[in-house]
Every structure is written in structure tokens, then in C-alpha cells.
Amino acid sequence: MKVIFIFAHYDDEFPVINMLSTLIDKASVHFIYVTTDQQHMGKRREENETVLSALGYSKKNIHHMSDYGLVVPDGELYECILPLRTILNSEFFLEESVVFTSAFEWGHQDHDALALLLHGMYRDNLISALYYIPTYSPIPNPFKFPIFDVMSYPGPGVEIIRRRLTLLGALSNIMAIMKYKSQFRTWLGLLPIYIIKILIRRYEVYYSPEKQGLPRNLSDISEALFVTRRKICGPEIRSYIEKLELLCKD
């Protein structure tokens, strides 16, 4: 059985760095990255391969959707959900697979769209098991700029799987994140809370979305989307909602 980590962006694996370092059969673990950051494309890809190589993974197990003819701009994954589903199903889900991805948590529209897409494929029995990894989510506030919580737990009723970290393991996670130098501005917002949580709580967490209560009607989410990093608005928000509603249909 394959283990596949599917992420929207090259640094989205940061909440489970320690888990990646301790997986035994690394040859059966694959990584898929969906979006293309035109501004930092080569640098982000290089940083990602450096981190994963240091954890013991071969470059041949790191896959990029741009190499399969699907170029997905950062922030626009929801526009490409149908061709992405086709490629995943035909190229990667030909055998039983356990899939990990970023959680649906209103933190980034690419994370949300990918989480819903994979949840739909799981409901269609195309994936053997699916787990969500909490990344970051917005904190309501009166200020003009978004503030995010990092690795926050989902609502009540969801069984959290916790991986205990040693102090050395927590410090190793922080040091690994420092290798994503091209995303310095992003880490300015996320890293302080991440460091506090990883050193005090010393857990990596993931969970099955089965009991999360994912939305079936997304017509009421526009307000929540305004606090995301990309701040989608106007007609774009309508397009986003309509595409996510398609993913939520049984």
C-alpha cells in the first residue's frame, strides 16, 4: 500500500516533518505538489527537495503537477479540480493508497479546495484512507490584516491522532522550516505561533475528516473567505463557492 502526501504548496508538509523523518519504508512514500508559484518556482522546488532529501526521500518520489501538463497558479487550485482529479486517479490511485493532505480549515483556498477534492475521491472509494493535517486557520480580529492560528484542532467529535515529539524532534522541525528561505514573509506570520505550540505542546497531529462535518452548502462562507491570505472578493468569491459546492455534492 502506498502512502501519498498531496499538498497544494511546496512547504505545506511543515506540520509533519518529524513524522516524515520516522517513516520506515520511505520507498513507498510519495509526495505530490499541485500549484506553481511563478515568482519563486525554481527556488521553492529546490528548497522542498532539499528538505525531503535530508529526511531520506528520493527525488523520483516527489511529483509535480506541472510535470504532468497541469499548471495551477498559486491561489487558483479551485479552478483546476476536475483535471487534477483525472490525473490523480489515472496516475497515482491505481493501487490502495493512504493519503495525507492539508486540512479544510478556511486558512487558504488552495488547501480547502484540495481537501474537499480528496474527500470526494475518498467517498467515491478511490482512496483507501484519508487524513487531514492542520496547517493554519484565520483568527477573527478587528484589524485590517489577517492573523492566523497554526496547527489548530478541528471541532468537537473529531478523533485527533497525536504524535508525541521529543524536545530534539521539535527543534529539528523548526530547523527544517528555516530551509524554506524564499517564504520568509509567510513565516514571519506563522512561525512565532508555530514555535510556541511545537515547543510547549510537542505534538504533531492529523485526523480523519469523516466526523469533521464538512460543509454541504457553502453559500454562507463568503465572510470567512475574506480573512484568508488571498482575500478573494466579488465575482471570484462566487466562482470559488460554486466550484466547492460541486465538490461537496454526494
Image: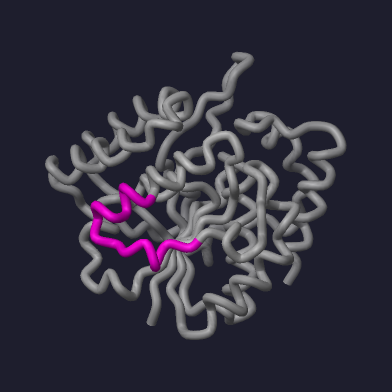
Q: Residue at x 25, y 55 (%)?
A: 55
2 or 124, nearer to the observer = 2
Q: Is residue 94 above or below residue 10?
A: below
- Answer left or right for 150 relative to 38: left
- Residue in the picture at 39% in, 67% down: 60
Q: Is residue 203 magenta?
A: no
At x 57% / y 20%, what residue is drawn?
A: 141
- Nearest the viewer among 27 and 193 is 27
Q: Would residue 203 be found to the left or right of residue 78 on screen?
A: left
Residue 10: x and y in percent read 47, 47
Q: Main structural element of the magenta stretch: helix, strand or loop?
A: helix
In the rendered image, the vertical position of residue 84 relative to residue 46, given as above or below: below
- Where, quadrant-wise, is the N terminus in this rendering? bottom left
Quarter occupied by the C terminus: bottom right
Q: Magenta segment range?
A: 49-63
Percent position of residue 95, x then y: 48, 85
Residue lying at the far top of the rendered structure: 143
Q: Position of residue 168 (x, y in %)?
A: 12, 42
Horizontal side of residue 235 vs 191, given as left or right: right
Query: For residue 170, what is the image quadrant?
Result: top left
Is 205 positioned to the left or the right of 24 in the image? right
